[in-house]
Image (spheres, rainbow, N blue to C red):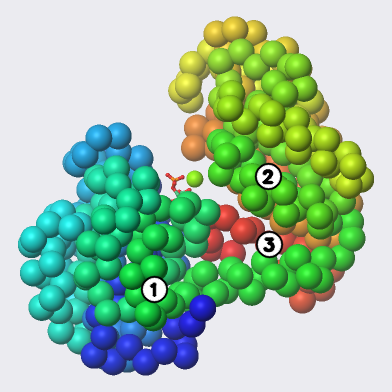
Amino acid sequence: MKTVDKYDFSGKRALIRVDFNVPLNERFEITDETRIKAAVPTISKILSDGGSVILMSHLGRPKEGPEEKFSLKHLVKNLSEKFGREVKFADDCIGEGAFELSSRLKPGDILLLENLRFYKEETNGDHDFSEKLSKHGDVYVNDAFGTAHRAHASTAIVAEFFEDKICGYLIQAELVNADKVLKNAEKPFTAIMGGAKVSDKILLIEQMLDKVDNLIIGGGMSYTFSFAQGGKVGNSLLEADKVDLCKDLLRKAEEKGVQLILPVDTVIADDFNNNAAKKVVESDAIPDGWMGLDIGPNTIKLFSEVIENSKSILWNGPMGVFEFSNFANGTIQIAEAVVKATEKGGYYDQWHRVNHCAHPPLSS
Ligand code: 3PG
Ligand code: MG
């Protein structure tokens, strides 16, 4: 894949897949612009070469068609301020008006397309939809690191329609870092995996099994593993169609001598909400009507000990619903343990080896 720094964008319209899936408050104001900032170097390089930019992204998970709260128009003001020019907006990513706008871009212009997921064709990876999107640009740039694990129209399929497919600075940096971690990992090497779904992380977990000494699994995805081991998960997140896969991964870990470590206790809630009633139970005994939303205190101790004794750590995904302050403790404590491991490592040049975060937050 070509990289942004080696490509001359002058006179070109660059169609860039960014990950502008940023949190908005009830007034549709951006509450964390980390992901926007992360895309600035790539966009700036293209503009300063004398190219123009068409930005495309998803925002949230709209169910069926357009929804006000998921409109990317809420980002226009922020982007216009950031780049010191009026950012144009197309309110339908493949509408006639959008093509009118993209065809008229002049060097230095920026056009933002409306949320790609207002079309189900985006997540379905639809061929025709991808081809339509491709008409917006002369070259394709992918800098959507946070969405790199999705084979969607705008992230994977659209690239087929371009001769010049270019990897943005953000993705490039993450690949270099990940490569460093994987190749030079000092042992013990521990991977911490979390987040809602096993299905998002299958490939990563499989790859990790060949590299790590310890694989810690927390967060929503741990319940499917627990269920696979015969545990009761109540109303927790469960991917029923991934239970066999979890069994398979557990078996592979054992074969490869990887210590796969799951939560031993869980903070459960009687509702999916920050103020729900909560209590701590053993991870394999979650009663019906209750759901696990964070790892429990014994799990924090267990995970932290492994982490603090590791020389290399790769972390992907939270330990619980950290967006709810009452269920953020597990994720925060694990971050503390990672910090301690980094401190023990001593030298600053060990940063990449000791603490690399391969999924958002992207700020580090
Ligand atoms: C994220 O926030 O994890 C990415 O933007 C991908 O979004 P998704 O999980 O809805 O595909
Ligand atoms: Mg996600």
Point out residue 63 in the picture as x, y percentages from the top left corner. 30, 34
Image position of 253 with respect to 207: above or below: above
Q: How crowded is mark 1: few (under 14 residues within 10 Å), some or many (20 or more)?
A: many
Alpha-carbon distance for marks 1 and 2? Answer: 28 Å
Identify which residue is drawn at 74% across, 16% down. 231
Identify which residue is drawn at 34% across, 84% down. 46
Question: Disc 2 designates what residue?
Answer: 193
Point out residue 308 in the picture as x, y percentages from the top left corner. 84, 50
Ligand 1 within 8 Å of disc 1? The answer is no
Occupied quadrant, residue 35: bottom left
Of marks 2 and 3, which one's residue comes earlier in the chain?
2
Q: Is mark 1 on a helix, strand or loop?
A: strand
Of marks 3 and 1, which one's residue comes earlier in the chain?
1
Question: Disc 1 designates what residue?
Answer: 141
Question: Disc 3 designates what residue?
Answer: 356
- Is label 2 in contact with label 3 (beta carbons under 8 Å)? no
Q: Quadrant of the C terminus?
A: bottom right
Ligand 1 within 8 Å of disc 3? The answer is no
Q: Is mark 3 on a helix, strand or loop?
A: strand
Going by the numbered disc 3, the residue's amino acid type is His
